[in-house]
Image (cartoon, rainbow, N blue to C red):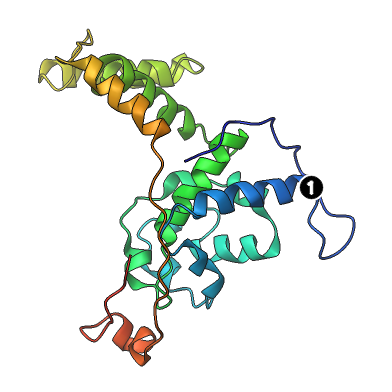
Amino acid sequence: MASARASTIPIKFHAPVPGVLPAPERELRRRFLEEAEVVPGGDRISQCLQCGTCTGSCPVSYAMDISPRMVIALFRAGQIEEILRSRTLWICASCYMCTTRCPQSIKITDLLYALKRTAIDAGLYPERFPVYRLSKNFVRVVNRYGRNQESLLLMLYYLRNPLGLLRLLPLAIAMFRRGRISLFPKKIKGVGAIRTILRASKEFELPREKKAVPYTEGMVGYGAVGKDQPERTS
């Protein structure tokens, strides 16, 4: 699982010698590779062809500042911090289309999640894109009430920007009248059990499994996305 949070990595530090990663980048790379070990077949990131199938298949790539293909290219170039500070990790819709269509059987979606966990541990977030606060507050609300409370989640999210919350007031009133949201959050029955499960999940060690995927002619070309596509192992 994710390692304990360490000190924040220095910002914008570049290697003085070409081809040599600075210490902060080496540390970020080490953390990510530890997270990638949890992903079955995570080491296949080295098999990327840079064909761009992942980017072409992604339904939200238009909103990303770094495309899925570029993520792997930057990883190879040692620009880990640039990846961790990108919006891409938080925009991913988890549709797994990139993973399904990758001719090299690279689990790109799971690796993006590994990068996101690395970014959270290192305290690296995109500038002027506070969606990570929404994620943190969602976890807080679920831990306390056992379910999401939309009205409370929005209030926590907009604490630093009250004007943004006021703009949503007409929509909130309309949703309240239709019974879509409630003013006062309520806990579910057995919320203690939910908290126990969440605490246990932090200590749970996922099984690590690596299986080599044998190369076949159907792994590239039209056969990779058609009925002749070989079955991929997990």
Residue drawn at 28 percent across, 27 percent down:
197
- Give neighbour class at mark 1: few <14, some 14-19, many 20+ (Cα, 10 Å): some
Number of marks: 1
Is the C terminus in the top left, top right, bottom left or bottom right quadrant? bottom left
Residue at the image point whose x is 51% and y is 61% from the top:
67
Kindly tell me whether residue 128 is visible in this rendering: no
Q: Where is residue 207 in the image (x, y as percent from the top left)?
A: 38, 50
Residue 167 picture quarter = top left
Residue 156 vertical position relative to residue 37 in the rendered view, above or below: above
Who's the residue at 52% across and 36% down the image?
129
Q: Which of 215 and 171 is in front in this view?
A: 215
Instruction: Answer yes or no: is residue 154 visible.
Output: yes
Above or below 13: residue 3: above
Mark 1 = which residue?
Answer: 23
Q: What residue lies at 40% left-to-right and 69% top-to-bottom?
A: 211
The amino acid type of the residue labelled 1 equals Ala
- List the single residue furthest toward the top: 184
Left or right of 77, for residue 64: left
